[in-house]
């Protein structure tokens, strides 16, 4: 059975009851279906979110190229044993999907167009990705430590503070404050922190030789009246006592892993924009720099770099991820851990936003990044060279027949575009919340039995997963049971009305098949008996291009309605409806309905 889905390990940002979470799509849907049993439709597990208490929203892209949160109406999964495709874009985004799952590009009219994965072409196809994921969760002032206390902690509650065994001078509030210094400490730890330096289980951060970062450590430690000390031959690491504080950072605030496995804690994704910026300030101050004409951060943890890219999108800062080729390391020359992942901010707009909202703790780095912004003359962002651009009379900056044109070139010539509709659409494309990135590589993955997953987003049927816009193809497969029921009724009535006697029949829609595109295939199977009671079977296949086939019917129906308006006729047009539609107010045999239309046109009847 076909897929039309993404693999379970693809990550997605979801808002659940107002709280944003980062999760693997498979983990989330599996957990929800464990909690609420799904129904089985066409071999797929489907959970209607209208029947559960959680309110779920995901990021989508509107027809005006704006990113917003939209309600998820269905959670879908099914098992497959077929090859998958791993699609990698030039700016580092990648996603694993079934071969018939759709991503998005631009059509010649400048509209979002779904394109099956098996039609993508490396080096040619442009794919839609978001440049921002807007959500402001509201500032979190504190976290109550009470639910996290256990016998394993060397602490108990005493009034408004924790009582640390043998350390009465330490004042850690039970309502742990989420201050600017704390958020910067989280970022610094993600960049250069650990819990086991020198055999200790204390919190350690490698900022001992950075005076301005040390000021952050000193202010935060002084809030709790805790001690710290520099460690190592060059005193490059700073150890913050006591161990209870380290336990809080690990068990409550989810700081874990080594340099190869670190992740941004899940709660960070639900912070306000200002608080997210403080975490990023700490991280870039530890692992980031201003170099050349860009700001860059680097890590040997690929998932951490992906998380940083997603946090930047929450602030409207577009970035690119790339990986250095493997190099020799203590873990072996071909080990994935020998790779270094980079996240770069290079467009002028993104750099300006970084300076305004994030920046560095170190003042000298802030001066450097301001100079980087000044070096950027313009933002090199491209729009696929679609027919709409040519119709607008937009001239490229070069005579070469390139597959894309710079956004700034389009914007500079918009005032010269006479057609208002074309001008407004191009302006929306250029100023929208998306960009268009070429496919770099398409890798075929060996088949194995596994679940694949999908969301239904009513009104859009597309959602952002792994920071790429993907299509909910199951909408095209008409999993909406109400629509299926309606289709079955209308199609069955259309056929049965032409048979002058009762006959057992089954008429119904089947799945949308992406590679057939606009081609509709009908299979007709008739079984009966002829003279002498001899069995007879007729098996017919009919194939038509659906749009023009339907367009002729619609045009004739509109003409009939115009005649009715001109003649002052109101109410249903019985004969016209019976001839043009499958489910009219009154069903008539085709010949009778056709004659009724001819009589209506000639003025011999009013309906």
Image (tube, rainbow, N blue to C red):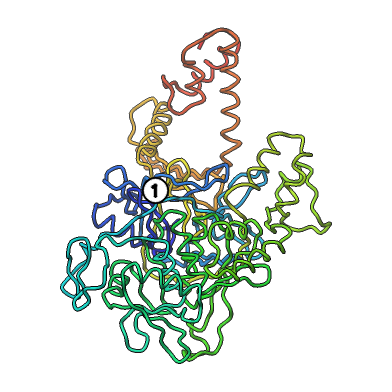
Spot the residue most to the left: 151
* Residue 288 rendering spot, x and y as whole percentages: 55, 72
- Viewport quadrant of the N terminus: bottom left
Q: Residue at x 41, y 72 (%)?
A: 218
Does residue 54 appear left or right of residue 329 in this picture? left
Looking at the image, is 100 positioned above or below residue 531? below
Q: Residue at x 50, y 10 (%)?
A: 570
Does residue 437 appear left or right of residue 22 in this picture? right
Which residue matches tag 1?
57
Q: Crowding at label 1, few (<14), some or many (≥20) Cα neighbours within 10 Å?
A: many
* Residue 381 rendering spot, x and y as whole percentages: 67, 57
Q: How many marks?
A: 1
Does residue 188 appear left or right of residue 130 in this picture? left
Dividing the picture into quarters, in which one does residue 159 lie? bottom left
Q: Residue at x 45, y 87 (%)?
A: 235
Spot the residue most to the right: 399
* Residue 71 rendering spot, x and y as whole percentages: 40, 44
Give whichever of 451, 458 is nearer the camera.
458
Give whichever of 572, 144 is nearer the camera.
144
* Residue 505 rendering spot, x and y as whole percentages: 35, 37
Give whichever of 27, 368 is nearer the camera.
368
Looking at the image, is 415 positioned above or below residue 463? above
Q: Residue at x 49, y 17 (%)?
A: 575
Dividing the picture into quarters, in which one does residue 413 lie? top right
Q: Secondary structure at mark 1?
A: strand
Looking at the image, is 492 positioned above or below residue 601? below
């Amino acid at each position: 059975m076909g897929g039309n889905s993404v693999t379970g390990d693809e990550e997605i940002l979801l808002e659940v009851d107002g709280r944003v979470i980062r999760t693997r799509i498979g983990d989330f849907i599996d957990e929800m279906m464990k909690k609420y049993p799904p129904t089985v439709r066409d071999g797929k597990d489907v959970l209607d979110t209208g029947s559960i208490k959680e309110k779920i929203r995901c990021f989508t892209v509107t027809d005006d190229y704006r990113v917003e949160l939209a309600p998820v109406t269905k959670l879908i999964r099914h098992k497959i044993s077929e090859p998958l495709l791993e699609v990698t874009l030039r700016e580092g985004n990648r996603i694993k999907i079934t071969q018939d799952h759709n991503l998005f590009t631009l059509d010649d009219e400048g509209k979002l167009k779904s394109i099956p994965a098996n039609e993508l072409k490396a080096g040619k196809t442009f794919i839609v990705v978001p440049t921002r994921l807007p959500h402001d969760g509201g500032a979190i002032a504190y976290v109550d430590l009470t639910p996290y206390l256990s016998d394993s902690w060397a602490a108990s509650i005493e009034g408004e503070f924790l009582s640390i065994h043998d350390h009465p001078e330490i004042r850690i509030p039970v309502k742990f404050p989420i201050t600017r210094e704390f958020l910067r400490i989280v970022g610094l730890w993600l960049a250069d922190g650990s819990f086991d330096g020198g055999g200790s289980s204390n919190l350690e951060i490698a900022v001992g030789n950075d005076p301005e970062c040390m000021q952050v450590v000193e202010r935060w430690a002084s809030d709790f009246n805790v001690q710290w000390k520099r460690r190592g031959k060059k005193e490059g690491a700073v150890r913050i006592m006591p161990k209870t504080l380290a336990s809080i950072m690990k068990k409550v605030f989810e700081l874990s892993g080594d340099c190869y496995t670190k992740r941004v804690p899940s709660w960070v994704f639900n912070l306000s924009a200002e608080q997210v910026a403080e975490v990023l300030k700490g991280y870039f101050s530890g692992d980031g720099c201003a170099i050349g004409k860009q700001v860059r951060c680097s890590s040997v943890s690929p998932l951490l770099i992906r998380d940083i890219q997603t946090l930047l999108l929450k602030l409207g800062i577009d970035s690119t991820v790339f990986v250095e080729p493997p190099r020799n390391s203590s873990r072996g020359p071909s080990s994935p851990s020998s790779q270094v992942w980079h996240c770069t901010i290079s467009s002028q707009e993104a750099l300006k936003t970084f300076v305004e909202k994030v920046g560095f703790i170190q003042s000298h780095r802030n001066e450097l990044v301001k100079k980087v912004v000044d070096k950027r003359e313009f933002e090199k962002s491209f729009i696929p060279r679609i027919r709409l651009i040519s119709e607008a009379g937009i001239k490229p900056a070069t005579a070469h027949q390139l597959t894309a044109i710079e956004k700034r070139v389009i914007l500079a010539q918009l005032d010269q575009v006479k057609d208002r509709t074309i001008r407004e659409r191009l302006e929306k494309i250029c100023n929208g919340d998306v960009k268009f990135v070429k496919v770099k590589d398409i890798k075929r993955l060996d088949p194995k039995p596994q679940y694949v997953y999908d969301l239904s987003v009513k009104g859009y049927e597309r959602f952002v997963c792994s920071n790429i816009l993907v299509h909910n193809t199951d909408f095209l497969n008409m999993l909406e049971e109400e629509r299926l029921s309606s289709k079955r009724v209308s199609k069955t009535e259309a056929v049965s009305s032409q048979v002058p006697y009762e006959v057992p029949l089954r008429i119904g829609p089947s799945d949308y098949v992406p590679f057939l595109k606009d081609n509709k295939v009908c299979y007709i199977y008739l079984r009966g008996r002829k003279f002498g009671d001899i069995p007879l079977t007729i098996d017919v296949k009919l194939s038509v291009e659906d749009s023009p086939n339907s367009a002729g019917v619609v045009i004739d129906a509109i003409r009939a309605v115009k005649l009715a308006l001109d003649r002052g006729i109101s109410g249903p047009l019985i004969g016209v409806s019976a001839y043009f539609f499958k489910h009219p107010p009154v069903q008539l045999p085709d010949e009778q309905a056709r004659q009724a239309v001819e009589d209506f046109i000639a003025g011999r009847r009013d309906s």
